Image (cartoon, grey):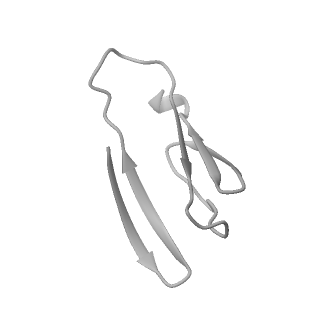
Amino acid sequence: MTYTTNDWPGGFTAAVTIQNLGSAINGWTLGFTFPDSGQKVDTGWSATFSQSGQNVTATNVDYNA
């Protein structure tokens, strides 16, 4: 997994890349927890995002399951 950010005052973008080295899958979910309770996902690409408090879940979209 690789994780890169582009930070600025009051926000950031992050790129997370995960590579499956095993058998093919059909559908995926990624969960993570923000370290700061004030952080939130505002916009996302290549996944459907949901958030409850600091906990975020990203789920595949049709074209990248």
Numbered label tally: 0
Q: Does 43 appear above or below 16?
A: below
Q: Position of residue 1 (x, y in %)?
A: 32, 43
* Residue name at image x 39 percent, y 55 percent: 15
Expressed as whole percent of the image width and height from the top left, the position of residue 16 reads 39, 50
Q: Residue furthest right?
A: 52
Q: Is residue 32 left or right of residue 1?
A: right
Q: Nearer the viewer, residue 46 or 20?
A: 20
Q: Identify the residue shown where x is 50% and y is 85%.
A: 9
Residues 35 and 7: in front is: 35
Above or below: residue 65 compared with residue 12: above
Residue 21 lies, with reference to residue 31, above or below; the image says above
In-image side of 40 versus 20 (left or right): right
Residue 41 location, x and y as percent? 61, 59
Q: Tell whether 42 sits left or right of 12.
A: right
Residue 4, quarter of the rendered image:
bottom left
Residue lying at the far left of the rendered structure = 21
Eyeballing the image, is 12 above or below 9?
Answer: above
Tell me which residue sits at (64%, 63%) in the image.
40
- Of all residues shown, which one is farthest toward the top? 23
In the orientation shown, which residue stands out farthest toward the bottom?
9
Q: At x 49% / y 44%, what residue is drawn?
A: 46
User: x, y percentage for residue 45?
Assistant: 51, 50
